[in-house]
């Protein structure tokens, strides 16, 4: 099943807080409550949402590319970089880290070309000095 941009935005908001009310989701997305409710029902019925806290069914992302994207960021621009990354639904989590890089994002996209586009978008953000991407080959376990 192909997810629309609205479906992806809804999933991103639910990952942040699966208890967010339908009215709050609708306001944040700029759509009606009926739209949010019908999309939630369809996503549940089609098995995309398999539980709450929202968990996307493994089959839905089978074959998707998952990567760790490490970023060196100018300290005074980190807040704006974080805000820009939060708006990208492909970014599942963002971590501030020690070492040669400042941030590590976990990203999931359907194909390698999509990862290329995403890393280019991230690299073009004001404040991002450089990026290094490591594609995940397999996940041994996840909690």
Image (cartoon, rainbow, N blue to C red):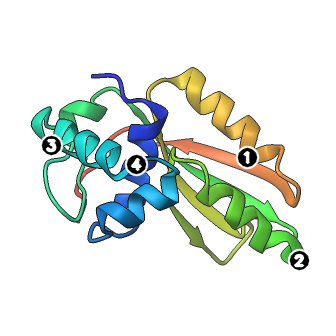
**Are the residues flagged by discs 3 and 1 in contact, CB closer than 8 Å?**
no
Query: Residue 15, relative to residue 111: is it above or below?
Result: below
Say which element carries label 1.
helix
Mark 4 or 3 closer to N-term? 4
In which quarter of the view is residue 25 placed? bottom left
Mark 2 or 3 closer to N-term? 3
The residue indicated by pointer 3 is 44
Q: Residue 52 has which mark?
A: none
Q: How far is disc 2 from disc 1 in space, using C-alphas? A: 17 Å
Say which element carries label 4.
loop
The residue indicated by pointer 4 is 32
Q: How far is disc 4 from disc 1 in space, using C-alphas? A: 31 Å
Q: How far is disc 2 from disc 3 in space, using C-alphas? A: 42 Å
Q: Whole-percent x and y of residue 48? A: 21, 39
**Are the residues flagged by discs 2 and 1 in contact, CB closer than 8 Å?**
no
Mark 3 or 1 closer to N-term? 3
86 lies left or right of 57:
right
Say which element carries label 3.
helix
Q: Residues within 10 Å of mark 3 (few under 14, many from 20)?
A: some
Kindly report which numbered mark, 4 or 1, lies closer to the viewer in this rendering: 4
Quadrant containing the C terminus in the rendered view: bottom left
Q: How crowded is mark 4: few (under 14 residues within 10 Å), some or many (20 or more)?
A: few
Kindly report which numbered mark, 2 or 3, lies closer to the viewer in this rendering: 3
User: Who is closer to the viewer here, 92 or 10?
Assistant: 10
Mark 2 or 4 closer to N-term? 4
The residue indicated by pointer 1 is 122
Query: Residue 113, relative to residue 92: is it above or below?
Result: above
Q: Residue 76 has which mark?
A: 2
């Amino acid at each position: 099943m192909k997810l629309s941009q609205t479906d992806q935005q809804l999933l991103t908001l639910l990952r942040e807080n699966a208890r967010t009310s339908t009215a709050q989701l609708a306001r944040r997305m700029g759509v009606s409550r009926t739209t949010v409710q019908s999309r939630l029902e369809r996503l549940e019925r089609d098995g995309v949402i398999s539980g709450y806290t929202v968990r996307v069914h493994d089959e839905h992302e089978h074959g998707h590319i998952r990567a760790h994207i490490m970023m060196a960021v100018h300290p005074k621009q980190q807040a704006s970089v974080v805000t820009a990354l939060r708006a990208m639904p492909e970014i599942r989590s963002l971590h501030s880290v020690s070492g040669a890089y400042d941030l590590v994002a976990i990203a999931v996209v359907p194909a390698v070309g999509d990862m290329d586009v995403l890393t280019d978008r991230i690299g073009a953000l004001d404040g991002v000095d450089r990026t290094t991407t490591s594609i995940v080959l397999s996940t041994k376990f996840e909690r």
